[in-house]
Image: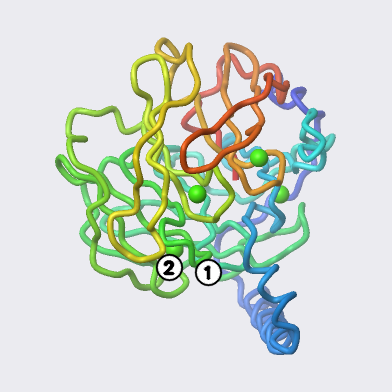
Amino acid sequence: MTSMNTAAGTNPAGPRASRTFRGLRALALGLTALALGLTGTAATTAPAAASAWTARGSSFDGDRLAELVAKDGDSFRIWQNINGDDWEWPWGSTGKLHGSGWSGVNPATVYFADLDGDHYKDLVQLDGDSFRVWKHNGALFGGNPWTGQPFRTGGGWSGANPSAVWFADINGDGTADLIHRYGDELHYFPNLGGGTSWGAPVTIGYGYGGSDPRAIWFADLDGDHRAERIERFGDTFMVGPNTTGGAGGWPWGTVYFTGSGWSGQDPSGIWFADITGDDRADLVQKHGDALRYFPNNGSDHQHTSWSAAVGAGNGWYAADPKGIYFA
Ligand SMILES: [Ca+2]
Ligand SMILES: [Ca+2]
Ligand SMILES: [Ca+2]
Ligand SMILES: [Ca+2]
């Protein structure tokens, strides 16, 4: 992991915040939530601004630029994205440790998703029969974002393949929905309230029983805040554009294809995440020792095009891609 740290500078003295519940912190969180509530009330007097606030993406630190997260021993090391909007090396100089107690956790069971629509991605773990959620409390980058007591949500997930579970906003209401491959089908459960309750499953794919779930992704490519369905198809990616997800039924329009040269690449080392902050997911890859991303250079319901690769890390050869997240 030492070489990994040099990817974007070294900061061995990052905070090691415990993920155990701490009462005083929870009290502070409650006060913060109260303050946020008051802010939200004030914002309703300016509907145009409130609307603009809603209509944008999320990330670990609350803006649109996705951070780099690596499961690093007992913690998560997170590099803040401060330059991605210039289509250059995205990360600030130091990766900072967040959380503790994660050393024995299968990295494939960890997800980052904005479940409550505040634009901060929350930390989710598939754990036994349900999911555990640590909501991001809005702390500035480097502070402890997970001071609140985790809650459990869902049920009946024992034995589920964690790689066949995704979180993405299918219906475009600003909160991540829960997607699952169940047998031959893809289902999604609409997020009905901050990730605490879920609607009845909606079928959004057939014929996936034999697919590698790591080669299926859900991400917003065209910036309308509804996630597309993306799957590797031979040498290319096949995209189901989300044209009707907001209506609650079958979301996908006519599929299209994008990219080439992807047949021999490890799908676990491919991500779709917005590195550049324009609400359009970029194509990110762990390529041998390097991390790189291809900026999304334009997308609509019929196409997505990509710009030339931009470097985003070195020293990652030995890292398990399942423990790398763009959040
Ligand atoms: Ca960010
Ligand atoms: Ca949603
Ligand atoms: Ca979309
Ligand atoms: Ca982008």
Residue 181 point in image, percent of width and height: 25, 44
The residue that mark 2 highlights is 195
Residue 222 point in image, percent of width and height: 56, 45
Q: Earlier in the sequence, mark 2 or mark 1?
A: 1
Q: How is the image coloured?
A: rainbow
The residue that mark 1 highlights is 116
Residue at mark 2 to residue at mark 1: CA–CA distance: 6 Å
- Seen at 56% across and 16% down, the residue is 318
What type is the residue that disc 2 sits on?
Answer: Gly
253 is higher (above) or lower (below) than 121: above
Label 1 environment density (alpha carbons within 10 Å; few <14, some 14–19, many ≥20)? many
Badge number at residue 145: none
- For this rendering, which residue is in front, 22 or 54? 54
- For this rendering, which residue is in front, 173 or 321? 173
- Seen at 50% across and 33% down, the residue is 303
45 is higher (above) or lower (below) than 113: below
Q: Quarter of the image containing the C terminus?
A: top right
Occupied quadrant, residue 28: bottom right
- Seen at 76% across and 54% down, the residue is 141
Occupied quadrant, residue 230: top left
What type is the residue that disc 1 sits on?
Answer: Asp
